[in-house]
Image (spheres, rainbow, N blue to C red):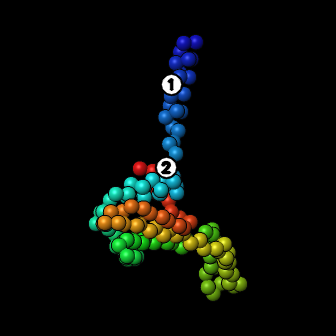
Amino acid sequence: MKKYLCMVSVCLVCLGGCQSTPEPQATEENYRILLDGWLGQDKASLYQVWGVPMNDYWKGTTNYILYTKSSVEDASEGATIERMPRIAREISFYEKPQGLVTRSCTTLFKLQDGVIVSWKFEGNHCVALPE
C-alpha cells in the first residue's frame, strides 16, 4: 500500500510539472500602466525609447507629441489552391478572405516645461504586456 501511495504521489508531482503557465496577455490596462510610467519623464527619454513621433507640435507654451501605430491583418483562413496547368479539366479553388482587420493606436503626450504631464490614447489596439 505504501509503495502504491508513493507511486501515485510521484505521478501527481510529474503531472503537476507538465502544466503550462498561461502566456501573459497584452491588455489596454497594461498600456495605461505603461503610459503612467512616463509621467514626469522628459522629451529626450521619450524619443530615445519610442523613436521619432508622427508629430511634435506646440500650442502656446504646451508641447504635444503624437505617436501612431497601425497594421492591417488578414483575419481569414482562406486558401488558394491551383491545379497544375495543362491537365485536363484545369481546376482552381479560391476561398475569399473574410476580411481585413485594421489595428491602430494613437497616443498623445502633453509636456509642460519639457516634462510629460499627461497622456491620452485612442484606437482598437492600444495594448501592452505586463511588466
Pinpoint residue 76: horizontal percent, then vertical percent. Answer: 63, 69
In the rendered image, the residue lying farthest to the right is 89
Residue at 54 percent across and 12 percent down: it is 2
Identify the residue position indicated by label 2 in the image. Answer: 24
Say what amino acid the circle numbered 2 marks. Pro
Q: Residues within 10 Å of mark 2 (few under 14, many from 20)?
A: few
Real-space Cα distance between discs 1 and 2? 29 Å
Disc 1 secondary structure class = helix
Question: Which quarter of the rendering shows the N terminus?
Answer: top right
Residue 118 seen anywhere in this rendered image of the structure:
yes
Say what amino acid the circle numbered 1 marks. Val
Residue nearest the viewer, comparing 15 with 109: 109
Residue 48 seen anywhere in this rendered image of the structure:
no
In the rendered image, the residue lying farthest to the front is 60
Pinpoint residue 8: horizontal percent, then vertical percent. Answer: 56, 23
89 w.r.t. 14: above or below:
below
Identify the residue position indicated by label 1 in the image. Answer: 10
**Is residue 111 shown left or right of residue 83?**
left
